[in-house]
Every structure is written in C-alpha cells, then in structure tokens.
Amino acid sequence: MLRTVSIKLHDRVLADIESEARSRQVSRSEVVRERLDRSKTDKGSVWDRMQDLVIEDDRAPTDLASNKARMRDYGRSGTG
C-alpha cells in the first residue's frame, strides 16, 4: 500500500525530477520513489555509485591497457 507524503524541494531538485519524469514518461512520484529506493542500495562499490556519471562513447578506446606502448614504464617513479 502506498501512503502519501508531502515534502518541500528546492526549485532545482524539483526541476530535475520533472525533467526526468517527462523524458521517461512516468510520474514525478515514480521518479521520487525510485530515487529513494536507489539511495538505500547506494552503499555498493564506487563503480555502482558513479555509473550515472560514466559517458559511453563508441569513439573512445575500449581499453588503453591493451596498448603495450602506453603501459611501458607505467607505475615507475618519475613517470606520469
């Protein structure tokens, strides 16, 4: 059973929620519920917490470590 809760939000937070709701064609309440549920599980790895910040770009190399020339001397003192 869902219960009603009223909250006050800063304009920028509400605008972000409204924008996401419009783009996904769901209600603002659905977005808020998902964000609250997600916040309970955000105690995962650093990767789990930053996935929404990762930019997927097909032009980027898949793995710079596969290029041995780039990895030569990696980790040695005085190299960057």
Image (cartoon, helix red, strand yellow):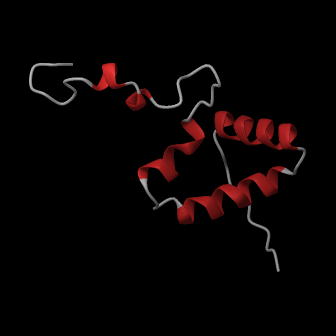
Q: Percent x, y for residue 61? A: 53, 24
**As drawn, which residue projects farthest toward the right?**
25
**As drawn, which residue projects farthest toward the front?**
68
- Tell me which corner region of the image, top left, top right, bottom left or bottom right, holds residue 74: top left
Quarter of the image that includes the N terminus: bottom right
Q: Percent x, y for residue 59? A: 62, 19
- Tell me which corner region of the image, top left, top right, bottom left or bottom right, holds residue 9: top right
Identify whether 67 is placed above or below 28.
Answer: above
Identify whether 64 is placed above or below 20.
Answer: above
Q: Residue at x 65, y 25 (%)?
A: 58
Task: State left or right for residue 29 relative to residue 72.
Answer: right
Q: Which is nearer the eye, 50 or 66?
A: 66
Q: Residue at x 79, y 68 (%)?
A: 4
**As drawn, which residue projects farthest toward the bottom?**
1
Q: Residue at x 21, y 19 (%)?
A: 80
Q: Residue at x 62, y 31 (%)?
A: 56
Q: What is the total number of numbered labels drawn onto the structure image?
A: 0
Q: Which is nearer the eye, 44 or 79?
A: 79
Q: Percent x, y for residue 11? A: 68, 35
Task: State left or right for residue 29 relative to residue 13.
Answer: right
Identify whether 40 is placed above or below 78.
Answer: below
Q: Percent x, y for residue 2? A: 81, 74
Task: State left or right for residue 66 relative to residue 77.
Answer: right
